[in-house]
Amino acid sequence: MNETSAVLVTGGAGYIGSHVAWALHDAGRRAVVLDDLSAGRRELAPADAPFVEGDAGDIGLVARLARDHGCGAVMHFAGSIVVSESVAKPELYFRNNTAVTGRLVEACLEAGIERFVYSSTAAVYGQPESVPIGEDTPLRPINPYGRSKLMSEWMLADAAAAHRFECVSLRYFNVAGADGRGRTGQVSPAATHLIKIACEAALGRRDGVEIYGEDYDTPDGTCIRDYVHVTDLADAHLAALKHLEGGGGSLTLNCGYGKGASVRQVLAEVEDAAGRPLAVSGAPRRPGDAVSLVADAARIRDVLGWRPGNDDLATIVSSALEWERRLQGAQPAAAEA
Ligand code: UDP
């Protein structure tokens, strides 16, 4: 299979998956979207991409889709992503993230798909002793979410060692922002991520923002994260696909900028973009939060030649705010779904 083959995008109607489906579309590649619509929305994916509502762990369905559409690669985004939920319902995460990925690998082997790009996470590192975090940092996830994703990475690596099958796993840091052309963005009804919450507050959709912990050992006392624009992340997936198609072989790469921003810095940026102050209050630390997660981002730049074009917080925040404005202007049902 080569560049004329289609790419099966699981979770392609979700936040990151839909951005990647659009990036494939923009690059003139054929995407086939498989999504169970538990969190995604059909209209977030490109209208010209074949869409199938279904389970990424349905081996028969995936193998049939892959054959019918001539898929040469899978990009796997379908899964569950809320850390606190993973602590309360670990079995859900081991099913939706780990077991589904295992079945998807079986489907790939059955259908002869040899290329796989996996949506992994910095949560596989847990609470590293030092930053920036290189890919060789010990893997000590501190919650079921991180473990469910790390197990998937291992399954994919084992499959790659045993079969004609290659995988790039991308470990995402904090993904935020939205498509610059307003075609897709985050729609989760109960947001948990800082930038979305702050943008909702800036638009009056919530009363304010709580800072989870102001007594951390950081310059302003709040946690530090490496925020990555979702458009740059989508580009990294296309670069990973090209790498595999060029015979580059399996890899595991961090996807971050190597720049940290504190919670307070993020909130100041949102205030700047919105042109109004936020009602900010202090709150206890959130269980399971690491103090500082910043990528050592050298490898992805070296190996994939990734050159992010949106790597500053102001750009990320203004695109997130712009998307929230669009949601607000949309039908009430759409804005709330
Ligand atoms: N955070 C916060 N208030 C919120 C949401 C998040 O103070 O309403 C903090 C959170 O404690 C963490 C950072 O913002 O330090 C990023 O959290 P988020 O949930 O966006 O991403 P995570 O790093 O947990 O994947």
Image (cartoon, rainbow, N blue to C red):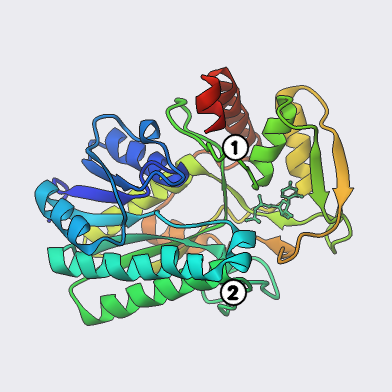
Q: Quadrant of residue 294?
A: bottom right
Residue that label 2 marks: 141
The disc, 2 or 1, on the residue closer to the chain's N-terminal end is: 2
Q: Is residue 45 left or right of residue 296?
A: left
Residue 2 appears in the rendering = no
Name the residue beneath numbered marker 1. Answer: 316
State the separation of the CA atoms marked 2 and 1.
Answer: 27 Å
Q: Amino acid at mark 2?
A: Pro
| Amino acid on which disc 1 is placed | Ile
Q: Position of residue 43 (x, y in %)?
A: 37, 30
Residue located at (41% from left, 50% from top):
236
Q: Quadrant location of residue 245? A: bottom left
Residue 186 seen from this side: yes
| Label 2 close to label 1 by CB (< 8 Å) | no
Which one is nearer the viewer's eye here, 109 or 261? 109
Position above or below: 297 against 127: above
Q: Could you tell me residue 226's position as x and y percent?
A: 63, 53
Q: Position of residue 205 (x, y in %)?
A: 70, 28
